[in-house]
Image (spheres, helix red, strand yellow):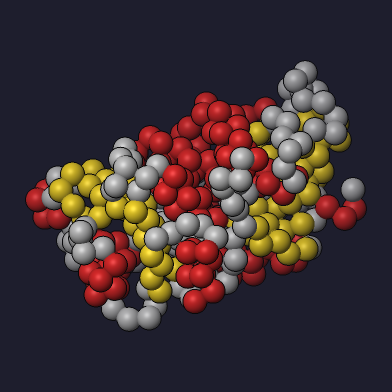
Amino acid sequence: VPSEGGVLVRNLYLSVDPAQRGWASDRSNYLQPVAPGSVMRGLAVGIVVESLAPSIAVGSIVYGFFGWQDFAIAEADEILNCESHPELPVSAYGSILGITGLTAFLALEKLAHLGSGQTVLVTSAAGAVGSIVGQLARKAGCRTIGLAGDEHKLRLCTESFGYDVAVNYKAGPVGAALEAAVPEGIDVFFDNVGGPILDEALRRMRIGGRVIQCGTAATQNWDPAPRGPRAEREILTRRLTWSGFVIFDHRADFARAAAALSAAIRKGELRYLEDIESGIQCAPQALSNVYAGRNKGKKLIYIGQAV
Ligand SMILES: NC(=O)c1ccc[n+]([C@@H]2O[C@H](COP(=O)([O-])OP(=O)(O)OC[C@H]3O[C@@H](n4cnc5c(N)ncnc54)[C@H](OP(=O)(O)O)[C@@H]3O)[C@@H](O)[C@H]2O)c1
């Protein structure tokens, strides 16, 4: 039974996010670790079946921290989106209107300072966040270079997501590949993975460049922390701004960003890709598969058959 201001949600789509690997560790990062034996923390899209929230009607589609479970009691602060978007399929609440689309839009808006003619490098460029970043940067008049891990993803980058150049970072040394792809240097590096690719990209930034650290998908375990070349000399001499971004700091902007993304889709200016499996039993392996690059777009698990 929900408390005053809360709702009972029947989950339809569970969101599989790389961040869950960090939440399911024994060290807190920007959120407390998930306690062993408790419901796995996760975002989900669901339908409201009981409501004690004056602004949310029964039957509304909502998105928020509802966990990997069939039903959830959600307090008001766990609901991230309860706006109506009938123009898009229900799954879109967990993909383009969810944290992946919102992260691409808001991290670029707040940190990239894009200018026409600038060069933007994106890692995991065919992924849920990266595919949107590439399209938005291209729309802003930038030259876009995407890194991805297989030939199918490279084709997606150039044929569907508007990248000027796509590079397979697994095909050879990344430094040489970047040298060939961005001889002019990089103005904005939107980094979803960190690790050795970041080490190489930092050494090819232009003076005054911006590095947006959105994710660290190249590293599955931070204990012990991996070692790499030192970065301070690059930051200093190239006058770089290296910013961390966490989407949950920007909740006040979610509705505005979701409306802008939805409008861009309606106008045919933005494409998004979803990779949907069925059944809650798929969820743990799906998270592992995302780290192995086996997802083709935003990974969601449909569990709505019992509605
Ligand atoms: N900061 C925030 O608020 C925020 C919000 C949402 C997401 N994120 C982060 O954004 C990143 C992308 O998330 P997403 O949901 O869009 O996932 P995604 O990009 O669809 O999937 C993750 C991708 O990472 C790539 N990858 C895995 N290991 C790699 C490695 N060692 N080197 C290079 N690439 C590797 C794989 O693509 P390839 O096959 O191309 O290697 C994989 O498909 C994640 O790091 C996530 O944590 C951050």
For this orientation, the residue located farthest to the bottom is: 172
Q: Position of residue 15 (x, y in %)?
A: 65, 53
Residue 296 visible to the viewer = yes
From what the image shows, is residue 78 above or below residue 71? above
Image quarter of residue 55: top right
Q: Residue at x 53, y 41 (%)?
A: 102
Q: Nearer the viewer, residue 194 or 186?
A: 186
From what the image shows, is residue 161 above or below residue 136? below
Q: Residue at x 38, y 65 (%)?
A: 165
Answer with left or right where residue 172 lies relative to residue 205: right
From what the image shows, is residue 57 above or below residue 144? above
Q: Residue at x 40, y 74 (%)?
A: 168
The quarter of the picture where the N terminus appears is top right
Answer with left or right where residue 196 lies relative to residue 154: left
Q: Residue at x 38, y 35 (%)?
A: 110
Q: Position of residue 213 (x, y in %)?
A: 35, 50
Q: Position of residue 188 (x, y in %)?
A: 30, 49
For this orientation, the residue located farthest to the top is: 54
